Amino acid sequence: MKSKLLIVDDETKILRSLKFLLEDRFEIYTCENSSEALEVFKNEKIYLVLLDLRLKEGSGLELMKKFLQFEPNAIIIIMTAYSTIENSIDAIKSGAYYFITKPIDNDQLILLLNTANEKLQMYQRINSLEGHIRKDIIGESYPIKQINDLINKIKDTNATILITGESGTGKELIAQKIHRTSNRADKPFVTLNCAAMPGELLESELFGYKKGAFTGAYKDEVGVIRRADKGTLLLDEIGEMDLRLQSKLLRFLQEKEVRQIGDSKTNEVDVRIICITNRDLEKEVKAGKFREDLYYRINVINIVAPPLRERMEDLKYLVAYFIDKYNISFDKNVKGITDEAYEILSNYTFKGNVRELENIIQRAVLLNTSEYIKHDLLHIESQEMASNSNNSTNNHVKIYEGENMKEIEKKVIKFALEKNNQNRKWTADSLGIAERTLRYKIKEYNL
Ligand SMILES: Nc1ncnc2c1ncn2[C@@H]1O[C@H](COP(=O)(O)OP(=O)(O)OP(=O)(O)O)[C@@H](O)[C@H]1O
Ligand SMILES: [Mg+2]
């Protein structure tokens, strides 16, 4: 069955040519104005939209926000002329999936739509079977039981919580569970990653700003603290926050009031704060990189997510859980894993913890063609070897039976990037593709 695609543009000519280009692949709906587009979007339950930002009647950005308000999982691709690139950046910030510039490169557009469509279908499959899958902290080991007990005890308090642990151990999952089981569950759960942006921007994201407070402040913005009012605010990678902002955060934690940048008055808020870090904050305090008073203020309750290698008795539950999960999302029917393959997993160190295990199982389920996953689909030996010989003169890309073109392509690009010191121009040249194509693929494969 073809997916529905809505194309919104005020130029009839463009609508016609895009329809012609894409109608073999998608069930196309076209609209020239906002109000009609919104109607079609709602009535036809469309999840994929190609939208021109500049419409004769109404703004494309506003329309996009309405789409996303109605259906937060919709994928909106923005089409734009070079002159409006800045608006496109705004659009991305407001939730657009991607933007492409006009004149449109047909190949690029088709590639983009195909990727978006795959993402959408996977998402819909997972969603339609939601409930089938327990989105919980899986494990029966002592540390996991302790964490669950602790969550139970503290979920309804307002105490600030610090979750620490190595990468991929499930810190975010713990934070989600605290909120989901707390008496704030029906209120917002807002996440801000403190490593994602420079200090100034982070400050404006946190506290919000008034229109005109600085260049680029086109409108009032309340900030994530106020958006999380009555709910929970998760500050991920808190260890990356700079010292100046740390003082501001501390002041907020003490006074429970926020002042938008450029505002004269303050607003009272009621938020539960959860912080996550994989840094050793005590060490950071000693090194003068993290404020001691803030450290004590956020570390009221500390939950430590243990590395997987310290609770290998959970391995069997996790493996079964991820096989279930990816059977659903890839529409497969894998029954389990062979003893031999399980043996390999249980002797593996999992430096990337549960996330690494999840990736291994995801991939194995995808590639598996028999009832049970065999050891050759785990690719663990090769992973360890690859990481051990990172800097050696590795001169070829390994290809395994059963891999599809995309996986091979991804490996080849990754390899070429490494060979060329991440220089995109050289890499593109060495692969004989356009730099723009390379950029797109880097994004597509998350390299
Ligand atoms: N105990 C668990 N049960 C089920 N899934 C888990 C568990 N622990 C981790 N996961 C899964 O592993 C992945 C990584 O978990 P999560 O994002 O919570 O890790 P993290 O500790 O926040 O990592 P990072 O520090 O890299 O951000 C997610 O897909 C998560 O659902
Ligand atoms: Mg995380």
Image (spheres, rainbow, N blue to C red):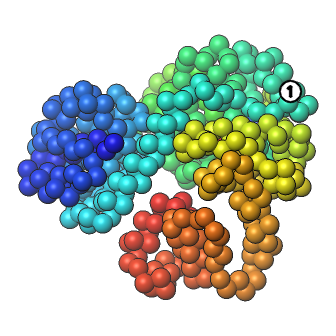
Residue nearer the viewer, 18 or 437: 18
Q: Is residue 267 visible?
A: yes
Task: Give the percent coordinates (x, y) of residue 309.
Answer: 88, 48
Name which quarter of the figure residue 439 lies in.
bottom left
Q: Which residue does the numbered mark 1 point to in the structure image? A: 145
From what the image shows, is residue 285 above or below residue 70?
A: below
Residue nearer the viewer, 398 or 171: 398
Residue nearer the viewer, 441 or 23: 23
256 sits to left or right of 102: right
Image quadrant occupied by the C terminus = bottom right
Task: Give the percent coordinates (x, y) of residue 45.
Answer: 30, 30
Mark 1 residue CB less than 8 A from any atom of ligand 1: no
From what the image shows, is residue 437 above or below residue 149?
A: below
Residue at the (16%, 43%) spot, across then down: 30
Question: Counting other residues with Cα less than 10 Å from the Cα at mark 1, is it few (<14), some (14-19), or many (20 or more)?
Answer: some
For numbered disc 1, what is the local secondary structure?
helix
Task: Give the percent coordinates (x, y) of residue 379.
Answer: 73, 63
Task: Give the percent coordinates (x, y) of residue 88.
Answer: 31, 52
93 sits to left or right of 232: left
Residue at the (57%, 50%) spot, across then down: 196
263 sits to left or right of 376: left
Q: What is the residue that sits farthest to the front in this orientation?
A: 370
Three-letter code, disc 1:
Lys
Q: Looking at the image, in which quadrant does ligand 1 appear?
A: top right
Q: Is residue 211 visible?
A: no
From what the image shows, is residue 249 above or below residue 384?
A: above
Image quadrant occupied by the N terminus = top left
Name which quarter of the figure residue 114 lies in.
bottom left
Residue at the (81%, 33%) spot, across then down: 139
